[in-house]
Image (spheres, helix red, strand yellow):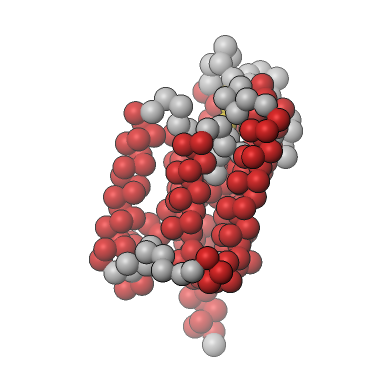
Amino acid sequence: MIFLRYESFRGYLRAYPVTSVIIALNLIYFIVIAATGDINDNYHLLHSGAFVSSIPDNSFGLNEPWRIITSMFMHSSFQHIFFNMFSILVFAPPLERLLKSVKYAIFYLLCGILANLFTGIVHGLFGDERVYYLSTGASGAIYGVFGAFLYIAIFRKAWLDQGSRKTVYTILAFGLIFSVLTPSVSLLGHVGGGVAGFLLYGLLDRAMTKRRRMY
């Protein structure tokens, strides 16, 4: 099972530096936001960097594009950050080891960015003018990680043991059901991140396969 973690704290930091930095940035930003206001107050979250889309003045959420990135490191509750950081802590390391740190960092950021862009575009095209869309959290990038493992489980089965493949399928199925049944959870962000991760990893896999054939 590749998702079981046996490393010591120091060993984890050395083996997965990007994942460690991502977790640290999320925790630090959460502490800062919690110390400066109410983490359940949308206005406070908005002023702290949450992603927002509103019709018609900011339909796709691109008026302040930096929010696409800052919102990826924000969380609106202790439960929110706990589950997201646990997911990163457990599931991200094998992907960082597989892609290596630089590629993994770019992959993670792109998945989160594309997840936010997808939600902004969908809300801009089909959203209600009376309702603005505000989101925070690392879920889009995390589902990008899950999407990458889904690609591996389908097209590179030999890389994963049976238990790991079942874990990927179970997490994605449970996550989709949870996203549909929980109004406060961004279904669009999860779907967008998952699809982005699946497609991006597919492109990386083809590029790496082509490079291996050349040599």
Front residue (pair 57, 109): 109
Residue reaching furthest to the top: 130
Relative to 154, 75 lies left or right: right
Front residue (pair 122, 113): 113
Residue reaching furthest to the bottom: 215
Q: Can the viewer see residue 203?
A: yes
Front residue (pair 122, 106): 106
Residue visible at 48% across and 43% down in the picture: 82
Tally of marks: 0
Front residue (pair 122, 189): 189
Q: Can the viewer see residue 152?
A: no
Indicate the position of residue 121 as horizontal and vertical percent values: 58, 32
Indicate the position of residue 91 as horizontal and vertical percent values: 44, 58
Quadrant occupied by the N terminus:
bottom left
Indicate the position of residue 108 as horizontal and vertical percent values: 57, 55
Residue visible at 46% across and 41% down in the picture: 190
Residue visible at 58% across and 60% down in the picture: 20
